[in-house]
Amino acid sequence: MAKAETKEEAANLHKATRAQITTLIISAFGLVAALAWNTAIQGIFVLVFGKASSVAAMLGYAVAVTIMAVIVTLYLSRLNSK
């Protein structure tokens, strides 16, 4: 009976490991996508406001991105709940 439990534990460990690796890979792709969007949004910001690297411009960018993230998150949450 101990051998069957060991096989079951090994199978559970393998399944959990595979799930964790899948989650990490998906997270890595999410990070790459976020960095790509960050670069694109920064480019749009420069086109609209010019090359201003002042603290006010950086704060404006941070606020704009935060507002956009909240709006998109709310939209996607509502879309997924339907």
Image (tube, rainbow, N blue to C red):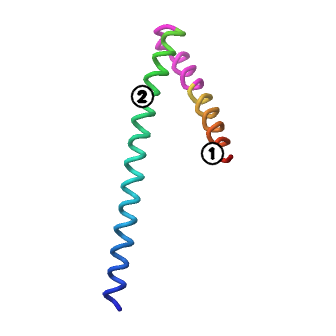
- Label ID, residue 24: none
Residue 24: where, in percent of width, then height? 39, 50
Left or right of 79? Residue 30 is: left
Q: Residue at 65%, 38% (x, y): give it.
A: 74
Give the quarter of the figure containing the N terminus: bottom left
Residue 29 position, x and y percent, is 39, 40
Mark 2 burial class by Cα count in 10 Å: few <14, some 14-19, many 20+: few
Q: Which residues are magenta?
A: 50-64
- The image shows residue 66 at horizontal and vertical percentages of 58, 30
Q: Quadrant of residue 62?
A: top right
- Where residue 3 appears, as percent x and y from the top left, is 31, 87
Count of numbered tags: 2
Would you call the spot at circle 1 few (<14 residues within 10 Å), some (14-19), or many (20 or more)?
few
Question: Where is 4 relative to 74, above or below?
Answer: below
Mark 2: amino acid: Ala
Query: Does residue 20 sit above or below 4 in this rendering?
Result: above
* Residue drawn 40% across the image and 59% down it: 19
| For marks 2 and 1 on the same chain, the one whose residue lies earlier in the sequence | 2
Q: Which residue is mark 2?
A: 36
Label 2: element kind: helix
Q: Would you say residue 63 sits in the magenta stretch?
A: yes
| Residue closer to the observer: 56 or 72 | 72
Residue 75 against residue 65 in the figure, above or below: below
Circle 1: residue type: Asn
Residue 18 within the magenta-colored segment of the rendering: no
Residue topped by disc 1: 80
In the image, is 34 to the left or to the right of 78?
Answer: left
Q: Residue furthest top?
A: 50
Q: Is residue 69 left or right of residue 53?
A: right
The answer to which of 80 and 65 lies nearer the viewer is 80
Distance CA(mark 2)–CA(mark 1): 24 Å
Q: Secondary structure at mark 1?
A: helix
